[in-house]
Amino acid sequence: MTPFALVTYFEPWWIQIIKALVIFGVAFAILPILTVYERKLLGRFQGRYGPNRVGPFGLMQPLAEIVKFATKEPSRPTTSVGYLFRIAPAIAILTAVAGLALVPFGDVQTIFGYRVGLYGIDVSVGPLYVFAFAGISFYGIMLGGWSSGSKYSFLGAMRAAAQLISYEVSQALSLVGVIITAGTLSLTGIVHAQRGMWFFIPQFAGFLVFMLASFAETNRAPFDLVEADAELVGGYFTEYGGTGFVAYLFAEYMNMMVVSGIAVTMFFGGWLLPFGIHPPGWVDPIVVIVKILLFITFFIWIRATLPRLRYDQLMSLGWKILLPLATLNLLVTAILVAS
Amino acid sequence: MTPYDPGADVIEVQRAPIPGPVRGTYRAFGETLRGLKTTFARIVEGPSTLQYPEEKTPVYPRFRGRHKLHRFEDTGLEKCVGCSLCAAACPADCIRVVAAENTPENRVSAGERYAAVYEINLSRCIFCGYCEVACPFDAITMGHDYEMSDYTRSDLIFTKEMLLAEPIERTPLRTEGE
């Protein structure tokens, strides 16, 4: 009997723990670099340098900031709901990390005689798992905004609720095309199905819809109405300072990595390389991480370019354009695959 | 019941045509791509930031920076004769001059008298350059130094010795055509 989904474990339990720690550690090592990378790249896009004073090339900037944030006095508004105010950032970061467990960084390798899959878990319901945790991650934002007891936070949380719900539909539908083409829900299986051709060529419409919806899901510009620094002074995390703020920041970047990882897995062939290049197995994680970084670069590029959408534009784009497009893409794919 | 008539003072607002599906798609994607090209051109162009403490903004030759007092190059005597015309011309009242007589044993300036005390309070100075204009002997001129911040107000009162001393040339001069 399978309780929730078929999870194919073939490693001993201690390898799974090591694997989880390594993935978690590497991801958390990349995160601070990402923050400084984003700010430096954003600076270049705007004709300036970005942070370059702390350490060589400003690379020590995140370290200085983490020390600063961690030593801040914890405080919360008197109107806030105490335990929810503390739990909310934890939910945000927990769901982001849970999503990361699914991104396959490589195929099954033999390390010291043990067969090890270079991914957290390989469940038979891959994308559903991702969307389940994306659905929970919205509680992190919602509870954080609501329990702050501040109007700005509350408005940000309300916007987040509406935005995430309306974009999650098209995001999920855009992936169904890929799932139909691959014929499997397992993410490693989907990567294996892309040996002939990466799915962004046959599923280009789906890829576009997925990317647009991902920008909205991760609350990135031009869909950052949730944060909207200019009007909402930061949105749902207005009242957070110190570690709570860092948790939300890291959750946002982690979500960006997860979404990029899913995009790489679903549309850009995961650890596969084009032109029939087959490097040895240990190169796979590097390939995946480089692809993820390219996607994040694209995220930053978009942020530097596009202004924030108006709220009604956001809604009409989601419901009137992306959802019909995703449905049409799904129907055409289904007909083509079935015939 | 007659239909509502807004009257002649309501003007029809001119609006751009609502884009159709093709034009709308072009707007959404074409213009986005154009925007992406614009921002990418900034990366290719490189930053235009001046890394200030390391690189300094070059000044023009007539830039009015910190004052300098001058000596005659051949005799080494001070040009200032302590006439206080600069103090009279100063709109901010930041110059204090106390004159004294030159004696044959102690000859400081070329004229009859010299400035025993010459102080400029740079925290009051507005760098208008009137002192330079008022001076009949070109004894005081405006230099190119603009880095004058200090920790206390009293440090900003520059004495005659400080103004006479050759300033540390910290400011680059703008070249011809720059």
Image: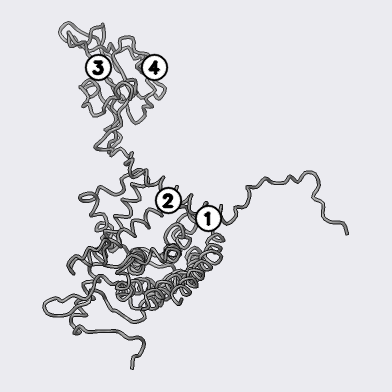
Alpha-carbon span between mark 3 and mark 4: 17 Å
Q: Which mark is residue A305?
A: 2
Q: Which residue is farthest right? A: B1
- Snapshot quadrant of residue A82: bottom left
Of helix, strand and loop, which one carries label 4? helix
Residue at point 26% right, 35% down? B55
Residue A57, image x and y in percent? 23, 49
Q: Which residue has dot 3 on it?
A: B116
Marks 2 and 1 close (CB-CB < 8 Å): no
Of helix, strand and loop, which one carries label 1? helix
Chain ID, mark 4: B
Residue A150, image x and y in percent? 48, 66
A281 left or right, relative to A194 = left
B16 left or right, relative to A18 = right
Residue at point 22% right, 69% down? A25
Residue at point 37% right, 55% down? A300
Alpha-carbon span between mark 1 and mark 4: 71 Å
Q: Which residue has dot 4 on it?
A: B88
Of helix, strand and loop, which one carries label 3? strand
Q: Which of the two marks, 2 or 1, is nearer to us in this view?
A: 1
Alpha-carbon span between mark 3 and mark 1: 80 Å
